[in-house]
């Protein structure tokens, strides 16, 4: 389906008040084959989104006029679904969570490497194209580290590699990622993911965690994504 497609050159808007970052990103967007445009404050940013209809927005958080969170929330509230990558100055988890909660698609922490930024742009654009070609409905996409889960499509990518999960493994991973940073006991997981209140079945959880780890790790360190907290349970960082 190509009806909704625009020309092949993607237009990317960066809303950022630091001239150095703005110029660096604009330069690299151009080199990378994108059309880059820029706004230096929140108000101009919103206007530019409406006028230029970019394919993707790189959005700084601390901006004069309006914050990145406000911009993000406003756009989503008015039904604008342009993919947004937040540029977070701090690395605190709370910034990232707030960014994703306000409707951003991804975030990248400053200072970022330009290669990482370009890779994120590419990934978000690809993800977005796949979902819009499927009929426009925006799928629920959740992510942690380099795991990306598409809930509606029951798809999991680990660093771009598709991973086949059973329904239960999928639900378990989804639960851990949606609550990432929190430690869950086997009993809690059994209750919250399986809906079982019988503690005698906790071995089921271990078996599923083991399979999940093997599939995600692909020969790599198996505890990379799901950590065991001794005496407590499991968590995703
Ligand atoms: Ca700033």
Image: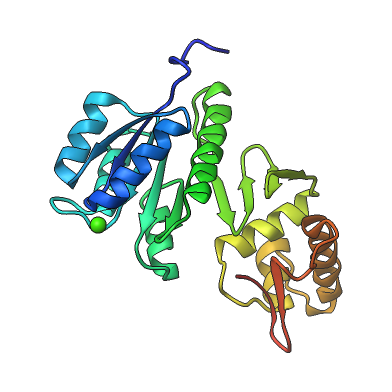
Instruction: From the viewer's side, name the closer residue of 199 and 64.
Output: 64
Is 71 drawn above or below residue 46 in the view shown? below
Residue 92: x %, y % from top left:
41, 71
Please, which colouring scheme is shown? rainbow
Instruction: From the viewer's side, name the closer residue of 215 and 203.
Output: 215
Task: Work out which quarter of the rendered image holds the C terminus and state it.
Answer: bottom right
- Left/right of residue 125 with respect to residue 233 in the rendered view: left
Residue 181: x %, y % from top left:
56, 72
Q: Residue at x 16, y 39 (%)?
A: 44
Task: Work out which quarter of the rendered image holds the N terminus and state it.
Answer: top right
Is 4 drawn above or below residue 161 in the view shown? above
Q: Is residue 46 visible?
A: yes
Q: Quadrant of residue 43?
A: top left
> Which image quadrant shows ligand 1?
bottom left
Q: Quadrant of residue 144?
A: bottom right
Q: Residue at x 44, y 57 (%)?
A: 112
Is 153 drawn above or below residue 42 in the view shown? above
Q: Residue furthest top?
A: 3
Q: Residue at x 51, y 26 (%)?
A: 132
Instruction: From the viewer's side, name the closer residue of 203 and 105.
Output: 105
Q: Residue at x 57, y 67 (%)?
A: 180
Residue 189: x %, y % from top left:
69, 70
Instruction: From the viewer's side, name the closer residue of 226 and 23.
Output: 23
Number of on-image labels: 0
């Amino acid at each position: 389906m190509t009806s909704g497609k625009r020309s092949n050159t993607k237009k990317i808007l960066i809303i950022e008040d630091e001239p150095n970052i703005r110029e660096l990103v604009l330069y690299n967007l151009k080199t990378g084959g994108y059309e880059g445009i820029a706004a230096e404050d929140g108000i101009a940013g919103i206007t530019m989104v409406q006028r230029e209809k970019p394919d993707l927005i790189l959005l700084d958080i601390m901006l004069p006029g309006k914050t990145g969170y406000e911009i993000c929330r406003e756009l989503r509230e008015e039904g604008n679904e342009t993919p947004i990558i937040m540029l977070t100055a701090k690395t605190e988890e709370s910034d990232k969570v707030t960014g994703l909660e306000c409707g951003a698609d991804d975030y990248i922490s400053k200072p970022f490497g330009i290669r990482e930024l370009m890779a994120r742009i590419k990934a978000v654009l690809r993800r977005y194209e796949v979902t819009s070609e499927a009929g426009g409905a925006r799928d629920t996409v959740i992510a942690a580290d380099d795991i990306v889960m598409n809930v509606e499509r029951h798809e999991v990518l680990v660093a771009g590699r598709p991973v086949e999960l059973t329904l239960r493994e999928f639900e378990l991973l989804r639960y851990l990622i949606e609550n990432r940073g929190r430690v869950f006991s086997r009993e809690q997981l059994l209750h919250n993911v399986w809906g079982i209140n019988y503690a005698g079945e906790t071995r089921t959880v271990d078996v599923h965690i083991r399979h999940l780890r093997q599939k995600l790790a692909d020969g790599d360190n198996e505890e990379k994504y799901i950590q065991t907290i001794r005496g407590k349970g499991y968590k995703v960082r």
